[in-house]
Amino acid sequence: MFTKILIANRGEIAVRIIRACNEMGIETVAIYAKGDEDALHVQLADQAICVGPAKATESYLNMTAILSAAISTGAQAIHPGFGFLSENAEFVGRCEECGIVFIGPKSETIEKMGDKAQARDTAMRAKVPVVPGSDGILTDLKEAKELAKRIQYPVLIKAVSGGGGKGMRIVEREIDLEAMIKAAQMEAQAAFGDETVYMEKFIVEPKHIEFQILADHHGHVVHLGERDCSVQRRNQKMIEEAPSVFLDDKLRARMGNDAVKLAKNVKYRNAGTIEFLVDKENNYYFIEMNTRIQVEHPVTEMITGIDLVKEQIRIAAGMELPFTQKNIQIRGHAIECRINAEDPEHDFRPSPGKISTLVLPGGNGIRIDSAVYQGYTVPPTYDSMIAKLIVYGQDREEALAKMRRALEEFIIFDIKNNIDFQYSIINHPSFILGNFDTSFIAKQMLAKTDRKEK
């Protein structure tokens, strides 16, 4: 087992990893950018090293500085969290060259599955259903037009290196195709440094279902059930829950088996997520694999009792999974709301600033994953998510009741936030009944819904 791990991230995921390491008796090294000196992850770690200016490309994406910090502090492994360098094959390769363990899959696996076009081809070879679309990247407009006609509009242009909804465009008509391809390419280049895109048939009003995978170095692969991530705004997830109210036992078993089959096919190691779209006829299609821990991993932890971050560390240290598929039991229901520093009344624009008042909800079945505290200043430089509110109930009805109560107790001043907006989703009749898909927010939610009067 490792004695010291460097966390190559910031915010709530860095805090989450540090806490897991502390419980395992592992020393931690935090990295931080200038301006993040007062961040909670810096305060909680055993050591902290500045790796550059506030700009992410010069600090949290600075491979040389991060590897130098790991070597100088004697860290044996690096945990990347999610975002930043977590799915960067070059960084993983450099870790391997330096003799530092990357807590995640091998560089060649990330290269294969992180490239969405390659991942699609891999899934087809493994006989896992995929959305109809291009065999590879789009290189010729004429061929793109012919493909779109063949699979029929609407189509979806997707960045090969995409994530978080960036580099994606829905195209309804051929006249818009060229402009939408260029727009997706420009956004992908700015976000990922890679403008390559591919095309898929756009599945209208699907459910977004993902399966959590754990795989060790001894050939053992299991899934920990599914998460429903259908409540999204502009392809970015807002609420996740597990298990899905949409899946029955038969469909769950088929999708879980395919998720494990695909992970085994690529000799996957560590934690990962296989993502599917499910249409109204219960047909499901593989869309991508995330080769890292997910933002929404806590809901899986709540219903399985398995600490995913600790399992990541154990797997990276060469240990076998302590359970088989038969040992994994799903109990109860969990829901997660992402709390963002943003203004729903003004197109969800980011709302950085100082938190003058912070009151966190508590009680049985309530979990808060966050790195903010009263007096903390949310910087304008990074992602707007400032907390994850997770609740657990014996069933979905109890989980919804706990989430309502927790959101009512959650108070943040003086920055704008989406707590009231999340509350309006939780109380929407369609959400309560489980009648929602990826179009739910766009089609059914108002711009502003007042919180329930106390």
Image (spheres, grey):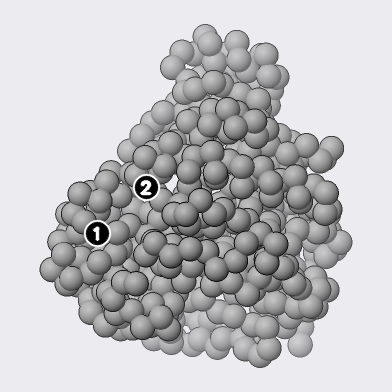
Q: Is residue 203 visible?
A: yes
Q: Quadrant of the C terminus?
A: bottom right
Q: In this view, does 259 lie to the left or right of 255?
A: left
Which element carries disc 2, helix, strand or loop?
loop
Give the amino acid type for the residue marked by disc 1 in the picture.
Ile
Task: List x then y, in percent, for residue 47.
Answer: 23, 79
Q: Nearer the viewer, residue 297 or 440?
A: 297
Q: Residue 18: x, y in percent? A: 38, 77
Q: Position of residue 220 (x, y in %)?
A: 54, 54
Q: Which of 112 and 276 is in front in this view?
A: 112
**What crowding class fits label 2: few (fewer than 14 Cα within 10 Å), some (14-19), or many (20 or more)?**
some
Picture quadrant where residue 346 is located: bottom right
Q: For mark 2, what is the residue?
A: 106
SS at circle 1: loop
Residue at screen point 68% across, 19% down: 151
The CA span between labels 2 and 1 is 12 Å
Query: Between residues 302 and 313, which one lies in front from this camera angle?
Result: 313
Q: Which residue is drawn at 73% across and 39% down?
A: 284
Residue at 59 percent across and 80 percent down: it is: 367
- 251 left or right of 116? right
Around disc 1, counting alpha carbons within 10 Å, would you say few (fewer than 14), some (14 to 19), or many (20 or more)? many
What amino acid is at disc 2?
A: Lys
Q: In this view, does 45 lie above or below 151?
A: below
Q: Is 107 above or below relative to 176?
A: below
Where is mark 1, residue-wise? 100
Q: How many marks?
A: 2
